[in-house]
Image (tube, rainbow, N blue to C red):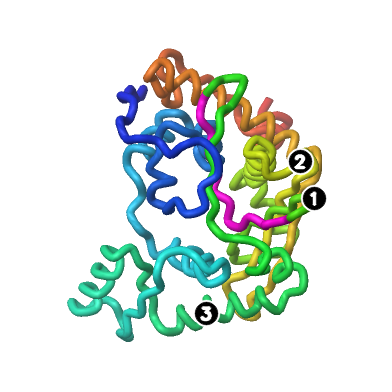
Amino acid sequence: MTTTVEAPAAEAPALGLHTDLSNESYHADKTSLSSTGARKLLPPSCPAKFRWEQDNPQAPKKTFDYGNAAHMKVLGRGQELILVDHDTWNTKAAKAEVTEARERGGIPLKQHEIDMVEAMAAAIRRHPLASALLEPAYGAPEQSGFWIDEPTGIRRRVRFDWLPSIQSGRLIIPDYKTAADASSDAFQKALDNYGYHQQTAWYEEAAVALGLGALDTELLFVVQEKTAPYLVNVVGIDFFAREIGRAKNRAAIETFAECTASGIWPGYSDDEPNYLALPGWAENRDKDTYL
């Protein structure tokens, strides 16, 4: 299915760095492309799905609450954590408190969940490298930036989890992630599953475009497990992975520019069928036996 929409009328944030732009205002800007949006434009997704999600923001989900709450405790900025002090949340009173908390823009949590994210933040502070990267005296959380992509003229945007306030030297930007498994093997799979190599290239380009850092700027992921002992792994992405991410981002940017100009956001197959082969492993399994 092809989705066609009119350009949004809301006023877009000004170009440059914003130190106090709310998360809601940042995500409400449909005139610019973010790293997350760029990944949604490319297979296995498609432009129609990207546009639909832009026009229909996700409702709050319990699965996102832990990550958002940990971000707030670790970074020091974000949604308010609101205690809903009921053993179970299936009663009328508990449901009403959960609804009220979400309507206030907060994250409803049980006491043991608040204890968990506080323990996660404490583990970050004890970790030598992670604590240095996220040192409150030398940086600020949730910094947003907007700039023009020179080849296409579209607006691009970024929201740094943490932006160091360096005076000189190389810019190292930390990005905080929570995960069930923070091991290097697990995060290597996540690079492909979630496109973190694309995020790396996007954020590093953003820092250069916004005049924050030079070409040697580097994004490092601070990955933390959500179960005790809340282990931390600081991960960098190698050069070749970043180059692949950069190339995929360029394809997404050009797709966004074309769709924005035409108002047409294609689905999976609008004009012709997609002809598919068997997966390679299935073909190899069956060809010698049956052919």
Q: Position of residue 76 (x, y in %)?
A: 53, 69
Identify the amino acid type marked 1. Answer: Arg
| Residue 228 falls left or right of residue 131 | left
Q: Earlier in the sequence, mark 3 or mark 2?
A: 3
User: At x 59% / y 47%, what residue is drawn?
Assistant: 194
The residue to which callout 2 is attached is 214
The residue to which callout 3 is attached is 116
**What main secondary structure does the magenta stretch of the protein show?**
strand
Identify the amino acid type marked 2. Answer: Ala
The residue to which callout 1 is attached is 170
Secondary structure beneath dot 1 equals loop
Check if mark 1's residue and mark 2's residue have beta carbons within 8 Å: yes
Residue 103 seen anywhere in this rendered image of the structure: yes
| Residue 59 falls left or right of residue 280 | left
Range of the magenta residues?
Answer: 154-166
Residue 204 occupies quadrant: top right
- Which of the two residues, 13 or 269, is positioned nearer the viewer here? 13
> Are there few (<14), some (14-19), or many (20+) residues within 10 Å of tag 1?
few
